[in-house]
Amino acid sequence: MAKANRVYKQKAPVKKNDRVEADIIDLTYQGMGVAKVEGFPLFVANALPGEKVLLTVTKVLKNYGFARIQEIVKVSPDRVELQDKLALTTGIAPMANLSYPAQLAWKQRQVRELFKKAQLRVAVAPTLGMDDPTHYRNKAQVPTQMVNGRLETGFYRRGSHKLIPTDSFYIQDENVDEAIRVTRDVLQDLGLSAYDEETGKGLVRHVMARYGKATGQLMVVLVTAKERLPEKEAIVAALRERLPKMVSLVQNVNAKQTNVIMGQENHLLWGQPEIEDQLLGKAYLIGPNSFYQVNPETTAKLYSLAKDLADLKPTDTVIDAYCGIGTIALTVADSVNKVLGVEVVEPAIEDAKKNAKLNGIWNADFVVADAPEQMHQWASEGKTADVVFVDPPRKGLTKDFIEAVGVMKPDRLVYVSCNPATLARDVKDLIEQGYEVDGRVQPVDQFPQTMHVEAVVKLVRAK
């Protein structure tokens, strides 16, 4: 995989405004094509591997540069012509110019190369994809900005804070797009202002929408910089009339000068404080701040696969580390004797307990704790588990966590990863703790049209 930080020893062979012809040899994590001129990397938006392009160099740094396409001399057979170029210019869907089968193949190759780089001989299965890889996201957090004196919603141009107003986000559920569009129109009609992060003036920072695909329930959240919300009653009346699927309207207050989108203070303007959705036969309550997977279709595939790989037995004790709101724990609870969930985020554990009760599950206990610390504590107390599920953040597992697994010695460990680079690193460390990969690594396309890929793999105690 091409990396920008690979050191280039000599003076750059190109300068700004040079025109060069080059072959595109790879894609970066940002979805930019990679060309090399005398070994010097140039990153090119909207360029695909296999293409020959005529370029104009736009910027030259010490070890790499940027260029834009003047002409595609040889077009990739995998290129898709887009009606809406915004998907690329905003970075909403940086792979939208690549055919979907080619996206899936690229993601499989990325996972394979990362395991090869970690010197692990592990088979990688073809990427599991979607029948329709568009309009899949059940949640959007869309920034607002004043444009020509009006509040607009849209996405920032890649690498900037310049807002590009748009009505369609290509990868979001149509109900989410409609909610954002209607809310923007209502806020415009009522003359509300967008927050300006430079001056600290203005009110509305983001508009968020969440949609339960299984239930048809819609939540709209106005993220504001101040608690006082002018035209509150008029906003409620207009959105109730124009969004019939809306069952929850919330104001979230974020008064801090921060790039964190949501604050912790919520005010229910109308309806229910949460919406409900269903995943693999279980119901989940989702509030404004709840973590919930944004692609329920592939999440169901991912968790079904993880459950099948675990080879669960009715006598098993299971640990769900980094359990979030309990989705994996509650998915497997019916099949085992006991589930222990651990998560450092307290509101997520409150959600997990609520969801367990909602589904009549009484054999799942949830603990607020740092997962590595809790694993060490359980191990020191002599507690053991037959199966451990891990679904960590992008930074992967800590050395402490992996050591605790080595002490606890579960028979099986199922690793659900959102970052194949840390997955490969952690698998290598788990092998040193006496485990081996059982079967193949399975990539899953949780975020079509983007560079991200999830993967799941099973490890077992070496005989």
Image (tube, helix red, strand yellow):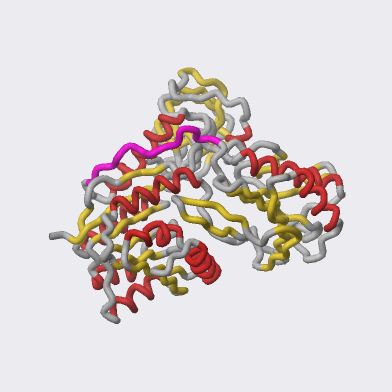
Give coordinates of residue 309: x percent, y percent. 29, 51
Going 41% across and 57% down the picture, which residue do you hit?
Answer: 331
Q: Is residue 447 above or below residue 311?
A: above
Left or right? Give the position of 232 relative to 35.
right
Magenta stretch encompasses residue 133: yes
Q: Residue furthest bottom?
A: 381
Which is more toward the observer, 376 or 432? 376
Q: Residue at x 76, y 55 (%)?
A: 204
The residue stretch that appears in magenta: 122-134
233 over 345 or under it: above or below: above
Q: Would you say the magenta stretch is mainly helix, strand or loop?
A: loop
The picture places residue 19, in percent across and down from the top left corner, at 54, 25
Left or right relative to 68: residue 183: right
**Figure quadrant of residue 25:** top left
Relative side of 353 to 226, left or right: left
Identify the residue at the far top of this view.
73
